[in-house]
Image (cartoon, grey):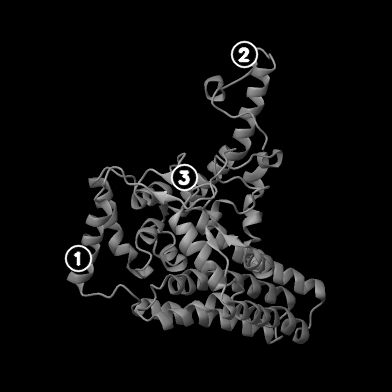
Amino acid sequence: MKEFTSKPLKFIDKNRSTFIHELRQRVDAYFEQTKKSKHANFEMFFKFIFYFGSAVLLYALIISNYFSAPVMLVFALLLGAFTAFIGFNISHDAIHGSYTSSPLANKILGLSFNLIGANAYIWSITHNILHHTYTNIPGHDEDIEVAPNLVRLSPEAKLTPIMRYQHLYAFLLYGLASFSWVFRKDFLKFSLKKIGQRVSNHPPIEYFNLFFFKAVYYFLFIALPLMVLDITWWQFIIGFLGMHLVEGLVLGLVFQLAHVVEGTAFPLENEEGNIEEAWAIHQLQTTANFACDNPIVNFLCGGLNMQIEHHLFPKICHVHYPKIAPIVKATAAEYGLPYIENKTFVSALRSHFTILKQLGKESWEKIDQAKKIRNGYPIATCINTEVLQKQPITEE
């Protein structure tokens, strides 16, 4: 497994590409010609009311104690989905500063991320800075290190025996993502001396926000239901876990289908600790879209199914992505650059499943075959010998 440098990573554009400059001019021209704002429009305000209103309604129906335990479980599962949709459609844009032109309004709207159990400040570092800058770069992008000892999401990650079955259990682990955010991940990030390349010198107000909003979440989603609902403790646990499994699975799938599918790259830094490519071209090489023509997916995913446009223009509100996508695609084609997309959600899911098998089961089989060749087994009993010569014989 490659050792990664701790020095700040830079993108070196040796070819002096004019792609991003031309693309920005064309996208700016679109907004000037249509006289549209790059921020929220009526659709976004409708989404705000719809998603927050639905989540509040579902929570109220559960806490009303008027329904049977099975019905409340259904409400809890739906609440998990709508919590994820709030993150996609409201919190995500606000934390990027693309919801409105007002930094204060974006800050306030971004706190919705805290209300659903996560932490907007930590997310702004790990997602806005690290993931958007170092997309799919092993050792720098934490989104491809979701469970390093259990799930392998890049060719440079260590390979352990259990990963032979990761295509079977990875989706269950994705379901635990929000559960980890609520109880573990945010606290852990605050305790680290460094997050990526950033020294962790957090403002005091962020410590207050961490503990205050976690306390609010624990009260609303644990203490209050246990006090007012006529259910047993184990029924509560089933509902609470079910809610988070749905939320985590929705979050995990949308994020993974955008970067860990067939065709996306996992570039390595050179000996100087740099990526020999323009940053914008790097984004095209490591990012994929899915189901862009599906209005339901567009409405639910908050533009995260159009990750190419989002990574290139994170300051533009996601409701505009369907209009600027043809501009991005055409410009990429003119420059001979990739534009990776899966036409449907199912095809993207299938592609991610294939990658999980390749990085897990199939990689382990190659190592096993290489060991047989090394130990003197007849070549006839081994397959893919040409590939195996390049396969590192390691279990780490």
Task: Please name the residue shown 66% across and 70% down the image.
Answer: 182
Camera-side residue: 70 or 326? Answer: 326
Q: How many marks?
A: 3
Camera-side residue: 364 or 4? Answer: 4
- First in sequence, mark 3 or 2: give its number: 3
Query: The C terminus lies in which quarter of the figure?
Result: top right
Q: Which residue is mark 2?
A: 380
Residue 111 in percent (x, y) is at 53, 79
Asked whether residue 341 appears in the rendered view, the answer is no
Q: Is residue 377 above or below residue 273?
A: above
Residue 179 in percent (x, y) is at 67, 66
Compared across the picture, whether 14 is left or right of 188 comes to: left
**What's the mark number on residue 124?**
none
Query: CA separation, marks 3 and 2?
Result: 42 Å
Single out the mark in the foreground, 3 or 2.
3
Task: Name the kind of residue labelled 1 in the image.
Answer: Ala
The secondary element bearing badge 3 is classed as loop
The secondary element bearing badge 2 is classed as helix
Marks 2 and 1 in Cβ contact (< 8 Å): no
Dot 3 alpha-carbon crowd within 10 angstroms: few under 14, some 14 to 19, many 20 or more:
some
Camera-side residue: 300 or 166? Answer: 166
Marks 3 and 2 in Cβ contact (< 8 Å): no
- First in sequence, mark 2 or 1: give its number: 1
Q: Which residue is mark 1?
A: 29
Q: Which residue is mark 3?
A: 273
Task: Name the kind of residue labelled 2 in the image.
Answer: Ala
Asked whether residue 133 appears in the rendered view, the answer is yes
Residue 207 in percent (x, y) is at 62, 77
Task: Name the kind of residue labelled 3 in the image.
Answer: Gly
Single out the mark in the foreground, 2 or 1.
1
Task: Please name the residue shown 57% across and 39% down the image.
Answer: 2
